[in-house]
Image: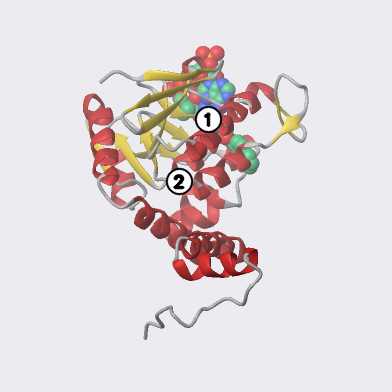
Amino acid sequence: RTWTSIKEFEEIKFEYFEGIAKITINRPRYRNAFTPDTVREMIEAMVFCRENPDIFTVILTGEGDKAFCSGGDQNIKSSGGYIGKDGVPRLNVLDLQKLIRSLPKPVVAMVNGFAIGGGHVLHIVCDLSIASDNAIFGQTGPRVGSFDAGFGSSYLARIVGQKKAREIWFLCEQYSAQEALDMGLVNKVVPLDQLEDTTVAWCQKMMQHSPLALRMIKVGLNAELDGQAGIQELAGNATLLYYMTEEAQEGKKAYLEKRKPDFKKFPRFP
Ligand code: 1HA
């Protein structure tokens, strides 16, 4: 399998293979910790994935065989957030989390090693997580002076339950891939040398299925948890589907032709 580069970035790789986009955090020196610039590049890549009609699924991973992502780069953490090249403190990974959740295509975390802190939250917000058997999971916030009380807590608790979520955050321990599997935190564990093959196979399986059906399931599963913002996204997708009907077309046509719309001819299903 040959991945071709979609665009060259400084802190990530962004590649494509047969309908699949792969975003790789490329800072193995720091266990793939992210800076605001890494996150800005990931956001640009995610937006590209959303807009590009040739991309059907997205894989998120880290470079090398040690880490998926170790969270925010502690070297540049300052008062108010992480400081990137522009000198402004930011927590822009929160924007990336929302983008992943609302991307109308499946996003799969390919967890190839440590998924720690804000890096752990990134795999949490992906639709599916496939881990290599050397992967290690955990939050560190309360130990290093941080916390993610957003998706990193409430959505984590939806996945593993309230008791386990509190344990993960209060004790800041590390969990093996097998333990993560046992608590429903990941979908599958495979040997590292099979990680990409398995992840690509899962993507290919999803790509055989109806993209609109997958899209509606994703937005429906989100809507239950996301309050009005979740309903807004579900509703947006309902509008998209409605616009594809003759009934909606009739309303627009009648307006442009300056006549009364004739909605009588359309079926009223029970
Ligand atoms: O909580 C949030 C947020 C909350 C709200 C909103 C936004 C948020 C955004 C981010 C975050 C956070 O991510 S807080 C949590 C930050 N991350 C951590 O506390 C993890 C720190 N790293 C580790 O615990 C370990 O490095 C490791 C378990 C991932 C791996 O351990 P290992 O294999 O023993 O490697 P290690 O020797 O520790 O690391 C290799 C090199 O990578 C070290 O550098 P060196 O001593 O060779 O110079 C290490 O410092 C560096 N490194 C690893 N992780 C980070 C890092 N450097 C900077 N930042 C890191 N996160």
Classify residue 74 by image quadrant. Answer: top right
For the residue labelled by badge 1, is the local secondary structure a helix, a strand or a loop? Answer: helix
Colouring style: secondary structure
Left or right of residue 58, residue 134 in this image: left
The reply to whether callout 1 and callout 2 are in contact (CB within 8 Å) is no
Q: Quadrant of ligand 1?
A: top right
Vertical side of 261 occupied by 2: above or below: above
Residue 92 appears left or right of 34: right
Asked if ligand 1 lies within 8 A of label 1, the reply is no
Residue at x 26% of width, y 30% of height: 195
Quadrant of res 146: top right
Q: In the rendered image of this protein, does residue 102 appear above or below residue 157?
A: above
Q: Disc 2 designates what residue?
A: 124
Q: Quadrant of the N terminus?
A: top left
Q: Relative to residue 34, is residue 231 depicted above or below?
A: below
* Whole-percent x, y for residue 88 in the image: 77, 27
Residue at 37 percent of width and 86 percent of height = 270
**Label 1 Cα crowd, 10 Å radius (few <14 / some 14-19 / many 20+):** many
* Residue 64 appears in the figure: no
Identify which residue is drawn at 29% across, 39% down.
203
Q: Nearer the viewer, residue 66 or 227?
A: 227
Give the Cα distance between marks 1 and 2: 19 Å
**Viewed as shown, does residue 34 lie left or right of 88?**
left
- In percent of width and height, residue 80 lies at 76, 36
Residue 173: x, y in percent? 45, 41
Q: Amino acid at mark 1?
A: Ala
Q: Amino acid at mark 2?
A: Ile
For label 1, the residue is: 45
Identify the secondary structure beneath mark 2: helix
